[in-house]
Image (cartoon, grey):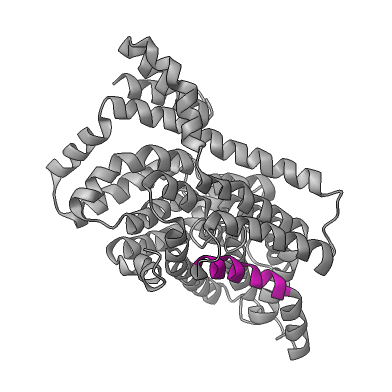
Amino acid sequence: MIIGIGFVLLLLIGVPIAFVLGLTGVIHMYSTGNYLLFNNVAQRMFTGIDTFSLMAVPLFILAGDLMNSGGLTVRLVNFARALIGHLRGGLAYVSIMVSMFMAAIVGSATAVTALQCNTLVPEMVRDDYEEDFAVAVATGSSIMGPIIPPSMFFVVYGVVAGVSIGGLFIGGVIPGVLLGLSMMVVAYFYIKKKGYPVKPRASLRTLGKVTVEALPALLLPLIIMGGILSGVFTPTECGGAAVFVALIVGFFVYRELTWKKIPKILGQTAITTASILLVVATANIFGWTLAIEQIPQKIAQLMLSISTNKYVLLFIINIFLLIVGCIMEAFAAIVILVPVFKPIIAQLGIDPLHFGMVVCFNLIVGMITPPVGLCLFVASSITKLTIEKITRAIFPFICVSVVVLLLVTYLPTLSVWLPRLFKLH
């Protein structure tokens, strides 16, 4: 009761989630009267982030920032436009395709949202697309970022659940592609209804030119996935390789990366990494206090008393996680809730890799769902469109995301087939 009241009150008064988690843990320790627990706070925070796998987080963030500054993003946009921009309403498809490409490079939904809203949305508006639809396409498709590898969500889940991060990376390919295709279907029906313009088809010469220019950017995801599949790299080492390739391409191939940009890029990477790891560290305090009271076991017993049918419980967990994803930061939710659900999925025989996909998919849908969908606020701050207008336009994309979520939930093969094929699970 004390934990719950403290947590809710701190959230309501606007305390940042990292401090909410840490302070809630401290409140609980104080309520127990065992003040010796305070001696372990710093140790628990350090233990929460003291793992080799979490080194992948700053490396992939740095790689993404280097690629954005090094000109890879522009080449990917030009490639997608030359490839499918001639279709009716082609810029909408280009937006979704660019999100798919950037997801395989950056791995962040908010970064992809910002990129799209700064580049493709203004072009769509100039071509007479309705602004709310343009923003909805850009924002809705951005959630492929944390599903198509590399994904920071998968790194954190893998550390917390003790699941192969390489297996999670490979397992996200099919769900991520399904999500992208489903959003193209939504865009197709909207485009057909509105009768958006048709652009001239790019010439073979233009297509060849932009393909050659985009080739280094297109090869980067292959290097990451190829390194993991071949066993040459661990996911963390792949992050280092991605940084190296991004530096080479930015400095010597596209020649848009300069030494003057490096300090700013490193600063952005440090800030983003620190914000993620601080959440993980303080969430470890909160999770530790929950474990002291055996809260995970009690919740498991409660849920199993409702039903022992794994399909029913997966549906309940989905509803719960969708709500959590709307109001809580995703990294915090993973660190807190995965230990709670581990006893349940173990008893029901649910594959932890498959469950990881379910957890992460729920949380990314929350990123475009009001009231606290982070991607909605990023899009609104850049485009100056109100949250209400974006929400109305993005609702079909939310619905189709939930449909794909249900497919991923009840067809485990979509998540585990590739990892098993490549013997990563």
- Please say if 138 is above or below 270: below
Q: Where, quadrant-wise, is the N terminus in this rendering? A: top left
Is residue 221 rendered magenta in the image?
Answer: yes
Residue extending farthest bottom: 204
33 to the left or right of 260? left
Magenta-highlighted stretch: main secondary structure? helix
Residue 387: % across, % down:
56, 45
Q: For this rendering, which residue is in front, 171 or 20?
A: 171
Is residue 53 rendered magenta in the image?
Answer: no
Residue 13 is at least partly visible in this image: yes
Q: Residue at x 15, y 54 (%)?
A: 309
Q: The magenta stretch spans which residues?
A: 214-228
Which image quadrant is residue 243 in? Answer: bottom right
Residue 9 is at least partly visible in this image: no
83 to the left or right of 208? left
- Please say if 283 is above or below 229: above
Q: For this rendering, which residue is in front, 119 or 170?
A: 170
Q: Residue at x 33, y 12 (%)?
A: 31
Task: Report the label total.
Answer: 0
Q: Where, quadrant-wise, is the C terminus in this rendering? A: bottom left
Which image quadrant is residue 98 in? Answer: bottom right
- Please say if 311 is above or below 270: below
Q: Residue at x 43, y 70 (%)?
A: 174
88 to the left or right of 78? left
Residue 40: % across, % down:
43, 20
299 to the left or right of 161? left
Residue 9: % across, % down:
42, 22
Residue 225: % across, % down:
54, 67
